[in-house]
Amino acid sequence: MTTAVFLLTLAFAVAVLLPFYRVVVGPTVFDRMMGIGVIGTKTVILVCLAGFAYGRLDMFIDIAIAYAMLNYIGTVVVAKYLDSGGARLR
């Protein structure tokens, strides 16, 4: 069972690196925001997998929920800033 959790965690860690390309190279600000959102979502899954691996899923779920809320609020704040014309888009 621990080997399966380790392999799944490793797969998600690699999957976090894939949208990082979009964050760095993305032609528009919106592509970069999308990449950051995907990275945040996959990080929440990694935190839940870590909780399962350590046998403390209840504690890690709370951390994952807090991180997901911060990720969502950050995305809304940046979207509101861009909508108000705070940054010049290409």
Image (cartoon, rainbow, N blue to C red):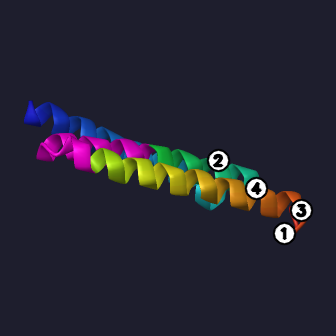
Amino acid at pointer 4: Ala
Amino acid at pointer 2: Met
Q: Is residue 90 magenta?
A: no
Magenta-highlighted stretch: main secondary structure?
A: helix
Q: How crowded is mark 3: few (under 14 residues within 10 Å), some or many (20 or more)?
A: few
| Whole-number angstrom distance, CA of label 4 to CA of label 3 | 9 Å
Residue 87: mark in rendering: 1
| Whole-number angstrom distance, CA of label 1 to CA of label 4 | 11 Å
Q: In the depicted view, which residue is nearer to us: 67 or 89?
A: 67
Residue 84: mark in rendering: 3
Foreground tag (1 vs 4)? 4
Residue at 74% across, 51% down:
30
Mark 1 vs 4, N-terminal side: 4
Q: Residue 24: give x, y in percent of width and height.
A: 60, 61
- Is residue 22 visible in this depiction of the protein? no
Residue at 16% across, 46% down:
56
Quadrant where the N terminus sits is: top left
Residue at 13% across, 47% down:
54
Q: Residue 57: give x, y in percent of width and height.
A: 22, 42
Read off the residue under disc 2.
34
Read off the residue under disc 4.
79
- Helix, strand or loop at label 2? It is helix
Quadrant where the C terminus sits is: bottom right
